[in-house]
Image (spheres, rainbow, N blue to C red):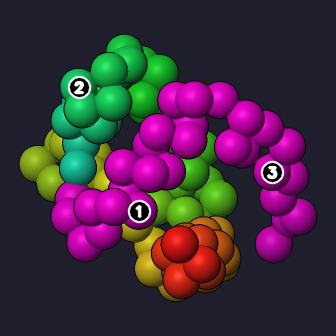
Amino acid sequence: MDDVQFDGLLGTCDETAILEFFFLLEGIEYTSETVANDIGISTAKANKILKKFAKYKFLNEKTHNKKITYTLNKDSIIFKNLKQINDFIVKEM
């Protein structure tokens, strides 16, 4: 597998909002339209970010009836590390 460069992965508010969205709502499948509406960004922008996160294996991507849905990949190293950071912060509060 090629090395993945994460430059800018957490660099925009939209990307961070989508990360938080999936982190808080793990286990549920969402379309790009739903994510875009909930985050308050365009569907095109959401599609771009969701495809990027699927490429990095942070999200699972499935096709149902010609609609692409995304779920959090709990086996992703990104998820595991963010969960560990979140758990640490909660513990320290």
Q: Earlier in the sequence, mark 1 or mark 3?
A: 3
Mark 3 and mark 2 lie on one chain; the one further toward the N terminus is 3
Residue closest to the eye, 19 or 33? 19
- Could you tell me how far apart the alpha carbons at marks 3 and 2 are, in whole angstroms? 26 Å
- Please state which amino acid type lies under the numbered disc 3: Phe
Q: Amino acid at mark 1?
A: Phe
Q: Secondary structure at mark 1?
A: helix
- Residue at 33% across / 61% down in the picture? 24
Q: Residue furthest left?
A: 65
Q: Position of residue 57 (x, y in %)?
A: 58, 65
Dot 3 alpha-carbon crowd within 10 angstroms: few under 14, some 14 to 19, many 20 or more: few
> Which x, y percent locates residue 87?
53, 80
Q: Is residue 36 above or below residue 25?
A: above
Image coords of residue 44 (percent x, y): 42, 19
Mark 1: few/some/many CA within 10 Å (<14, 14-19, 20+): some
Which residue is rendered at x = 61% and y = 54% of the image?
Answer: 55
Which residue bears the numbered disc 2? Answer: 37
The quarter of the picture where residue 84 lies is bottom right
Dividing the picture into quadrants, the one containing residue 31 is top left
**How far apart, in angstroms, are the residues tagged by discs 1 and 2?**
17 Å
Picture layout, residue 16 above or below residue 24: above
Look at 56% across and 51% down and name the residue there. 53
Classify residue 22 by image quadrant: bottom left
Element under disc 3: loop
Q: Mark 1 = which residue?
A: 23
Q: How many marks?
A: 3
Mark 3 lies on residue: 6
* Residue 37 in the image, given as x and y percentages of width and height: 23, 25
